[in-house]
Image: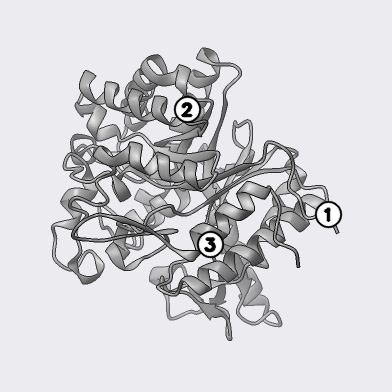
Amino acid sequence: MERHFPKRFLWGTATAAHHVEGENRGCDWWEFEQEPGRILNNDRSGIACDSYNRYRQDFELMKSLNLNSHRLSIEWSRIEYSPGQFDPRQIDHYRDVLGSMRALGIVPMVTLHHFTSPLWFARRGGWAASGAADAFMAFVRVVIRELGELIPMWCTINEPNLYAYWGWIGGAFPPGRKGDVVGFLQVLANMRVGHERAYAAIKEAFPEAAAAAVNAKVLMFPRDARRRADRWAARLSQSLLDCWPRGRRHLQKVYESSGDYIGVNHYYGQTAAFNPRRPGDGFIQRGNPPGSVVGEAGYAIDPAWMRQVLMQLAPLGKPIYVTESGVATNDDGVRCRYLNEVLAVVHAAIQSGVDVRGYFLFTLLDSFEWALGYSGRFGLVEVDRKSLERHPKPSAALYSSIATANALPDA
């Protein structure tokens, strides 16, 4: 059976600036990390992978693996270090980053907001404050004007659902609030406005560019499908994960917002059960499906779920990019099996008629992984924490062989 992917399929990796650049001191995450107990093992991002200085080396590594695309973020706090003050040196830096990628034939997919915000913005209330979208747009307009000609693909905002949840309800992201449902909804509402306005500005300046928001697709299953209350809990959880507010009384699916493609990040699934003793969680208890394989990040992983994700999104009629997918593990054999299995699922979906045009593995380098610190090892390449030397793993060779052939290995 033919196991090739479409021509011009994008084979890439994905990351966030804060994960890899290092010394990102002007953002809310840097301050958040300094508080003991916030990050697993009290890790701090510190120098990270020093990709701020070693980006050319990293791009050469991508090129050696025959990857043709990379999703990265531009750090807002570096470019706009105080309100309305933009650093031309940082703009030049990112111009060289993007130019270096393109010179190697690597297509940049640029994220404008990937979980980090400038400290000055966070201290004014961040995305929960009135005027948040206005502040974001000042940065967006500068990026469009100064760097837009180098960016063929844009992600306006990354995972607004998880960002708002973990920052205002779960407490694991800045500002570390718990149970603030009003703040959660306000963040989502402001991010929706920010996305819509950023999308319009990008398309006005560069009509041929592709832009969209990127959302996390967490599949929710009833803990007991025979219980009506559990089925309700799963449906409600799925709706809240997939939507953001549009006006006071309506919800809009993120995937149905303005966008030229669907960007989907998929890692895991969860069960949902109605529990009257959990009012702080909306009377819903979530957990891993019984008997599931649980990765080192603590969530259940099953490559077969990717097909369900893609089939659910296909009716929207837009090109789909898997903008993040991967597994946190210290056992690279697990990563190799995951890669083979999940890409077989993506291929099967394409064969079924789903318009999938790219796959971005999370991630290239073992790096700082938000609340997991340096324990969340998603990388194809190990980074020595002292020397910062890069050491490709067997999974890097596997992914390279698939990208080079644009096909899966013989079954």
> Where in the figure is residue 366, as x and y percent of width and height?
35, 59
At label 3, which amino acid type do we have? Answer: Tyr
Residue with the mark numbered 2: 102
- Secondary structure at badge 3 equals loop
Residue with the mark numbered 3: 267
Distance Cα–Cα, label 3 vs label 1? 27 Å
> Where in the figure is residue 87, as x and y percent of width and height?
20, 22
On the rendered image, what quadrant is the N terminus found in? bottom right
Distance Cα–Cα, label 2 vs label 3? 29 Å
On the rendered image, what quadrant is the C terminus found in? bottom right
Q: Which mark is residue 2?
A: 1
Asked if residue 187 lies left or right of residue 385, the reply is: right
* 255 shown above or below 77: below
> In front here: 227 or 70?
70
Distance Cα–Cα, label 2 vs label 1? 31 Å
Q: Residues within 10 Å of mark 1 (few under 14, many from 20)?
A: few
Return the disc, 3 or 1, that comes first in the chain's sequence: 1
State the residue at coordinates (82%, 47%).
353
* 203 shown above or below 133: above
- Secondary structure at badge 1 equals loop
> Where in the figure is residue 203, as x and y percent of width and height?
55, 19
Return the disc, 2 or 3, that comes first in the chain's sequence: 2
